[in-house]
Amino acid sequence: MRAVEQQPYLEAVDAALADRGYRRTKRSQEWSRRDGSDRLWLHLNFGRALLQLTVGVEYRDVQEAWESLPGGVFSTSESPQEGLSSSDSAERVAEFVRDVAVARLVELRDRNWVIDRLLGSDVRSWPTISFSHRIRLLPILLVDRCRRLEALEFCRSIGTDDLLRDQIRPPFNEFRDALEASLAN
């Protein structure tokens, strides 16, 4: 979709989110706002046939405490039945963003809801970009919720086969050691 065709959609979403405190910079397709220590964001990606909406929450306190690790979660509309198409009107897109996407952000802000998803075995329900992010963020959130023993048990449950799937730095063993050291204090 060309930029001139995108403009009515962007303006409609601007109007739908303005009263909720979300702002978009002029040339961006992303809206964001601060809510406590969290940053909530929505990004609308224009394809030829589909409009893909991704929403996310950056847990700023987690990012500050664990600078090199993921500190946020996200969710993307995955199918035309769940999401939007380029044939939808700008008003329909704005309504979807206001009603569905903002509700999804409420879920993602709820750290207990996120923990429940990350504890599950269904990869599609994890609101993280990868397995590597999941195995780091989950114990951090468990500790944040005073579930320290559960966080340590989860870290210790990560086996050799799991470590072969780990693809980010620092290596998980270093992360686990740092987490355990922080809990010993």
Image (spheres, helix red, strand yellow):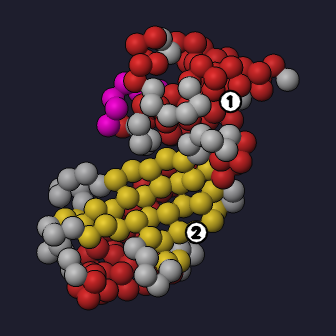
Q: Which residue is mark 2?
A: 33
Q: Quadrant of the C terminus?
A: top right
Q: Position of residue 107 (x, y in %)?
A: 48, 49
Q: Residue at x 41, y 37 (%)?
A: 130
Q: Which residue is mark 1?
A: 143
- Res 12 visible: no
Q: Residue at x 50, y 34 (%)?
A: 168
Circle 2 packing at 10 Å, graded few (<14), some (14-19), many (20+), is: some
Q: Position of residue 90 (x, y in %)?
A: 26, 81
Q: Amino acid at mark 1?
A: Val
Asked if the stretch drawn in magenta spans residue 41, the answer is no
Q: Amino acid at mark 2?
A: Arg
Q: Position of residue 144 (x, y in %)?
A: 69, 35
Which of the 4 image quadrants contains residue 179? top right
* Residue at the right extreme of this rendering: 185
Q: Residue at x 26, y 75 (%)?
A: 92
- Res 69 visible: yes
* Helix, strand or loop under label 1: helix
Disc 2 and disc 1 in contact, CB within 8 angstroms: no
